[in-house]
Image (spheres, rainbow, N blue to C red):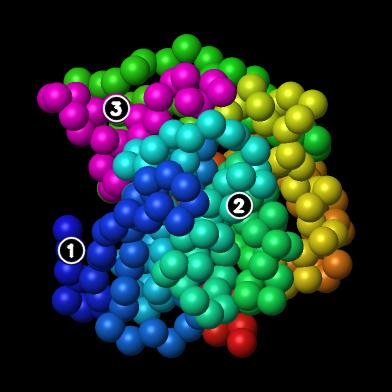
Amino acid sequence: MTQTNERAGQWHTGTSTGAGFRQFYREWRPHEENFLPVLALHGSLTQSGMWIELAERIGTVHLLCPDQRGYAGSDTPSGDSCLEFARDALALADARLPGRFVVMGHSFACAIALDLAQAAATRIAGVVLVDPVTRALGSTAPRGPAAPQPESFGTLEEAQRHFLETEEGEWPAAALARFTGDVMIEADGAWRFPYTLERLRRLRAFSASPAGDYDIFAKAPRVSAPVLVFRGGASKRFPAAAVEPLAAAFPAPPKIVLCPTSGHFPTATEPHIVAPALVDFLAGLR
């Protein structure tokens, strides 16, 4: 299926098996590409649809947005390590982005982005982290299996109320409606999350285990590319106390952009801040 935004470009969708399983992706192809392309990796509570609003708002940036293993339109192979997710992402980039590109991750995928930046250092021109999870420094992000929550909702409005009640920060009504419509999946007359609860429990259990490899503070010193970080001002996953230690962990200080009224999803709640800051960052890369 191809969707068109006549002003700026087109959405294309497809599947890839380069990582050894069926992986769905959506790809925003602008009419004019003035920047390096961006491989955008969603967090553990969403899917590739979380990037739709940002891509269309900017218009001129090529975004490749996969559903990661176990999410939405992709299969669920065994394995939950950060390294395996990074290999999946690199396999898709090899197929769709043959040259240099920027990797962007949200939430737990920030660790995946940092792994990818190290594994493909000659191809990664920059790294963008959107509200990374910083458990070591006061984050209240869940460490273990997911808490009980509904399997599905009868209406999209019920799903909106769920996010409004469970996520911090301010949620403008239009932004909340757009976000839920882009990340929830409609099936059999109901709206469900883009993952199974068992999949989320498995991922959280692994990341909290001794084998978990999602520590961004351990990965940051090995990243040589320029880094841009977005933080939600009300975020519980990336509290203010973690900003300075995270910045100090990188070889060169990253640029940090505060989205003051946002919680964990600044791309949805304050895209008017995220979009120009991302474009400015991309404009400075070669």
Q: Which mark is residue 192?
A: 3
For badge 2, the amino acid type reads Ala
Answer with the quarter of the image where residue 116 lies: bottom right
Q: CA distance from mark 1 to mark 2?
A: 28 Å
Which residue shows up at 67% across the image and 67% down it?
A: 120
**Horizontally, is 121 left or right of 98 in the view?**
right
Q: Residues within 10 Å of mark 3 (few under 14, many from 20)?
A: many
Marker disc for residue 3: 1
**Three-letter amino acid code at disc 1?**
Gln
Marks 3/2: CA distance?
Answer: 26 Å
Look at the image and say whether residue 239 sits in the magenta stretch.
no
Label 3 sits on a secondary structure element that is strand
Q: Residue furthest top?
A: 148
Say whether residue 162 is visible: yes
For the magenta stretch, what is the residue range?
178-202
In the image shown, does 214 or 182 lie closer to the viewer? 214
> How far across and how far down the image is residue 15, in percent?
32, 54
Dot 3 or dot 1, earlier in sequence: 1
Query: Height in image: 83 above or below 167?
Result: below
Residue carrying label 2: 86
Query: Would you place residue 53 above or below residue 70 in this image?
Result: below
Closer to the eye: label 1 or 2: 2
Q: Position of residue 2 (x, y in %)?
A: 18, 63
Q: Is residue 198 magenta?
A: yes
Q: Considering only order in the chain, which callout, 2 or 1, is on the residue closer to the N terminus?
A: 1
Q: State the quadrant of the C terminus.
A: bottom right
Amino acid identity at mark 3: Arg
